[in-house]
Image (cartoon, coloured by chain):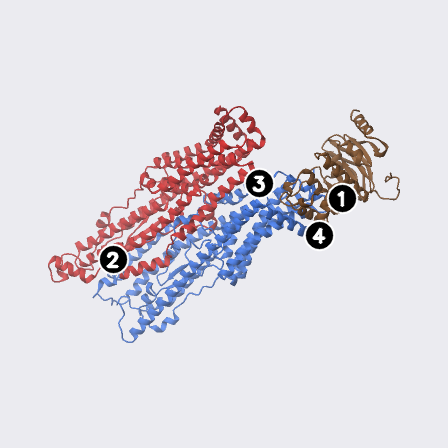
Amino acid sequence: MQTAESRPGHTPLLEARRLSKDYGDTRALDSLDLTIAPGEVYCLLGPNGAGKTTTINLFLGFVAPSGGQALVSGLDVATHDRETKQRLAYIPEQVMLYRNLSGLENLEYFAALGGKGSLGRERLTEILVEAGLERDAVDRRVSEYSKGMRQKVGIAIAIAKEADALLLDEPTSGLDPKASNEFSALVERLRNRGVAVLMATHDLFRAKDTGTRVGIMRYGRLVTELSTDEIGHADLERIYLQHMHD
Amino acid sequence: MIRHIVHKEFTDVLRDGRFRWCSILVGSLLLISLGHGWVQARNTQQEHAAAQATAREHWETQGEKNPHSAAHYGIYAFKPRLALSFVDEGVDPYTGTSVWLEAHRQNDFMLRPAQDATAAQRIGALTAAQVLQHLVPLLIILLTFGTLAGERERGTLRQLLATGIGRRELAGGKALGVSSALALLLVPAALVGAAALVVASPGPAASPLARGTALAGVYLAYFATFLALSLAVSAWARSARTALVVLLAVWVVNGLVAPRVAVDLSKWLHPTPSAFEFARTVESEMATGTGDISRPDRAASTEHLLAEYGVERVEDLPINAVGVYLQESEEFGNRIFDRNYGALWDTFERQGVVHETLAVAAPLLAVRTLSMGLAGTDVEQHRHFANAAETYRRDLMRQMNGDMTENSLTGDFTYTAGAELWEAVPPLQYAAPPLGWVLGNRVLSLLVLGAWLAGAILAAVARVRRAEVT
Amino acid sequence: MTVRTVLRNEWRLLMADQALRIVLGLFAVLLVYALANGVVWLRFQERTVEAVESGNVERTSALQQELDAIANGGQPSSPFADPRSPLVLGGPGGSHTAVLEPGSLTALAVGQSDLLPYYYDVNIYTNESSFQQNGEVENPLNLMVGRFDLAFVVVYLLPLLVLALSFNVLSEEREQGTLALTLSQPVSARSVVTAKLAFRALLVVGMVLAMSLLGILVTGGLDSPGRVLLWCATVVTYSLFWFALAAWVNTLRRSSAWNATVLVGAWLVLVVVLPAAINIAAGVLHPLPSRIEMITAQRDASNDAVNRRSELLARYLEDHPEMAEGVVADEPGLGALAWAATDAVNRRLEQVTSEHDAQRAHQIILVRRYRFLSPALLAQDVLIDAAGTGDARFVHFQSQVRAFAEEWREFFVPAVLADEQMSASVLPNVPRFRLADERPGEAARRAAVPLTVLGGLVLLVGIGAGVGLRRVRGAG
């Protein structure tokens, strides 16, 4: 397994440099240092309020950092909003779409906003199918979709964008095991295309399964970082619980 | 049980900042408009009364002249401002305030206050009636749209009904709670209004207290209708937001759209002639007569008199033949005026019925009609005064022509009468119609308002019974 | 790119939302209804104007015929209505009616045209009291309520539609969760919201302007492009004000329900409560003088004049020439004497009126200042002025009629005083009223300040919204 550090001279796709965020007196994120290279899937683990979502929001520029920098392909998010977003795709915990439009129409809209307005309907349909949506669901209104189906449209949006990096915020919570498994397979495929993935999750099993590296967070700090091929499922759970009880 | 609900709603409403501010706004607008209306009504009434006295003085001191010259000089009648007009000025700004009563002609009322005002003053006149008709219902909507829909959204409705309370009790309690909060606003205003009537009536009126009480009753029925309607919608709507949107739509249609639709609809169903056409018709009918109304023939009239008195020549008549002929022309003219003005007023009345009928879609139209009627400021009571003034004119002309006929001879153009005759003419005394007359004109509006009230209450009961808990 | 994408998406969303479609359809129906009403009213006025004008022609030709007949040795139809007398030819029987053509955009805004008189019979006896006449025959109830015309729809209902379409333009995206996904794309919240509002503005303003232009085309209002432009500019500015307000409230990051409440409240205050409160304040602080004293003054003046004249016979003959058959008015200077009395009354009346009018004008200037407090009043004011149915054009017309009456008197009075007789040869020289309508720039000049203020408001609220939108992010 190669890491960004092991390939000097190559810019990491996602990088946090002493990244901090305060909400009032609360320190939500404390001096996070992080690098994620192309083809890496980095899973952030930790309890609620550990700073996982804050990290993702900082990379998206949804919140301004209190200190440090979030970099995408070496560009500071705070000063290069457009350019960095161009390179990012984001799938929230709940992919919320325009309920009165079909999955295809939603994809068409968001793809166009992401600068892929030239993709034709056939191509977009293919992407939706690739993302795992049934072909006959493509033209149905999103109000009839299950959560898993909406999640797949979210992936399709990410695929269509051909982004270099993918930010996932608890993408599998609330999905049934089958859908969850399909989701992991998709992430795997993107990884193989050289996409860098940052995924916040509670799901230790999924983290071990899809992740190449795992970071455990608590109280806004990254307390430990592991490479998944060095440990087994049981090890991860033990290490995680150990950190939670310190 | 219900007592607790009323108490809780009452406290809830009073502690709600939105309600406090809205009520303070509506309450102060109500009081200001009442005060302003009272001052204006009193000033106008004083001015009209003074002008009427001056007009009488002009009449009495017009000096020695032929009675027919006096008839041409005529007298002005000024429309009195009735006491309750301070609550609802109605159509008063759009009817003239005075009319010249002269020989041969029925004149139009002149000097419409609105004509002197600006366009801006026309779109937003604020009277107590406007506040009661538009703003209080809005307040009711704001207070009630969330009563059931909101409780359902928050999940408190489950909890409430789990206590074993009946839905009807719940809705009744809420209605009473909101009403008592509203009463804090309306009762003082009603008392101020009543005090203004009793202690310092701004003008004359027939049975002002009976009219005032009826007025209060009408508005209470209107508010109750809105309260029940809001409850019904709140019970029916899936969310508080839907309830609010639906109720606001009702409010807009009721207060803004329906009244204006009624205007054009009434004009379309019952068109009025143009002023030009009307004047031309009257002029031509006066010149040639129409149908079975024919101009009196002067020769025939003289012939008739000669035969009646058994004389050969006009000079031998003991009376003035010209006076007789003038009175005959006067009566001919009266028939023409009755025909044309009568038709016009009847058209206005039919147009009014269109407004009243459309109240089926917007209760405001019924309430507005009743309110103006009770305040004495509707078209019908303007007509009532116009008729009184016209009757007075005809009596005056008859008296002048009679004096000329009896006291002078045909061909004598030098006969003059003096102050004695002028003073013998009684001054114009106008008595506003009694309450029964007003309500009798307004049966349709009373029925429609009653139907709205009953319908709204039934809808509220039915909806509350069927309201979904989650 | 973004704009086109958002516009297309908004169109899809709109087409997919049945409630919105119904609302828009309803609005379209109301627009058509309002326009139809306006057109009916305009046609009514046009027919009346035509009848009045043909009345002028008929009167002149009747007089011409009678004068020709007399010149050929015939007799006047009545010795007391001898058209050769300047008091007859220039009097009520020979009067000329001065007409104000309906404003070019009357079909869009009835304005004051149902209340104020738009024609006056002018003759030698025309004086200040002649201007105290009613306008069109109209049910006072209908006058009180006002018309359902396009101006009404624009001032009252259009803001409600704008608010209904835009109260949740941003808050809904946040509430349904699409905002995060949208803003994770390389677009700014400002451009997305602006595009969304632009779409709604195009739709709403487009509908109103299309209907206005349709009305203008149907009724031939294109002859005054300046007024059309002014109308359109006002509609656009006023609508933008409400869009800007909705955008600004959306940037406060509250819930859709909160936005709706606040915006409806703003509508109520600006459109309903403020104009009413302003009118009360104006009524209390600057009451308009009453016209009633004018009647008293007029009576006093005519009493005076009559007393001074004291020729009862002359008075009687003037009232009733037909009653005095056999008594011939051959006293020299009778006409001059009567005229002297009339003139005395007129002068006194002018004095009273000018005092009254000065006071009224002063009060109205004060009252009109308050309209700057409410965008609705400003818009209403400019809209009806642009339509040519506002107060100003009627005032302008009245002053022209006054001048014309003066011209008329100058033509006939010398003959009255000299006791001359007139013949058919003077008829072509009798003054005819030619309306010199306001110059096209006049309404624009009057509208400049209100429209600038309205535009300034739009800018102010718009900048507030723009600043707020810069702070909008996908989360937090």
Q: Which chain is red?
A: B
Residue C260 has which mark?
3
Q: Which chain is blue?
A: C
Q: Residue furthest left?
A: B310
Question: At 62% across and 49% down in the image, what residue appears?
Answer: C12
Q: Which residue is mark 4?
A: A120
Image quarter of residue B17: top right
Q: Which residue is mark 1?
A: A88
Residue A136 has which mark?
none
Do tags 3 and 4 sit on the same chain? no
Given contact means CB atoms under 8 Å apart, are the residues at marks 2 and 1 in contact?
no
Do tags 1 and 3 sit on the same chain? no
Name the front one of labels 2 and 1: 1
In the rendered image of this protein, which colour is used for chain A?
A: brown
Mark 1 → mark 3, Cα distance in angstroms: 35 Å
Task: For mark 1, name the chain.
Answer: A
**Label 3: few (<14), some or many (≥20) within 10 Å?**
many
**Label 4: few (<14), some or many (≥20) within 10 Å?**
few
Mark 1 → mark 4, Cα distance in angstroms: 22 Å
**In the visual, does A95 lie left or right of B379?**
right
Residue C249 vertical placement versus B341 (above, below): above
Task: For mark 4, name the chain.
Answer: A
Viewer-side residue, C378 vs C114 = C114
**Label 2: few (<14), some or many (≥20) within 10 Å?**
some
Residue B166 vertical placement versus C472 (above, below): above
Name the front one of labels 3 and 4: 4
- Disc 3 residue type? Ala
Viewer-side residue, A141 vs A84 = A141
Give the structural element (helix, strand or loop) at label 1.
Answer: strand
Mark 3 → mark 4, Cα distance in angstroms: 38 Å
Q: Which residue is mark 2?
A: B293
**Label 1: few (<14), some or many (≥20) within 10 Å?**
many
